Amino acid sequence: MVLIPLLIAAYLIGSVNVPIVLFRVLGREDPRGRFSGNPGMANVYRQAGWKWALMVLLLEMGKAILVTAAAMAWLRLERVPWIGLGLIIGNLYPCFHRFQGGKGVANYLGSISVFRFSSHPCSWQRGWLRGRLSTGSPNDPLSALSFWSAFSPPGSSSAVGRISSRSWGHW
């Protein structure tokens, strides 16, 4: 069974929080210590500027892209989202940073971009458009449809995927 070791590896890789490590290397204070207390891109932007924030976003997304792409080589397609979930949980509750992490947004974006873009190039743009048309609230039904349809395997007949396709088929 390859899924369990890959899931553990994804959690451990997700636990390496790039902003925290980067700020330590640069001799700066922990990014969780100021502003929102979140070590994500927005907080890095407030503390170090847009160049560092962009670098953090690209490194976190790149980490997720590499792990997800590797998982696609080892696992059946319907099991790959579990690896993305392992990355996100690792970012939320990092074992290397006293279980105080970020929100997992960059890991989600990196993981889902590989998973969905590899199956259908237009799905990423359609998901972006859905996000623009919705309020962006996690409680918004359009956001929920985007999230769940993103994790349904291509060609699946899940109810959410069917609802999503019918609702947004004209896009």
Image: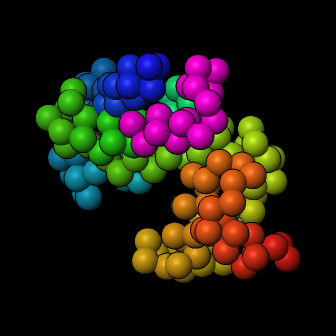
From the viewer's side, name the closer residue of 52 and 87.
Answer: 87
Q: Which coloring applies here?
A: rainbow
Q: Which secondary structure dominates the residues rendered in magenta?
A: helix
In the image, taking residue 109 as reference, residue 83 lies left or right, namely left
Residue 52 coordinates in the image, percent (x, y): 46, 38
- Answer whether residue 138 is visible to the viewer in this image: yes
- Of 135 and 41, nearer the camera is 135
In the image, is 132 to the left or to the right of 136?
A: right
Q: Which residue range is magenta in the image?
A: 69-86
Q: Quadrant of the C terminus?
A: bottom right
Residue at x 25%, y 35% (from the top left corner): 94
Q: Residue at x 54, y 61 (%)?
A: 147
Tell me where residue 46 appears, x and y as whole percent. Answer: 37, 53
Residue 79: % across, % down: 54, 36
Q: Nearer the viewer, residue 42 or 47?
A: 42
Query: In the image, residue 72 lies at what x, y percent?
Result: 62, 27
Where 47 falls versus 73 (above or below)? below
In the foreground, 119 or 14 = 119
User: Is 23 situated left or right of 67 in this image?
Assistant: left
Image quadrant where one finds the N terminus = top left
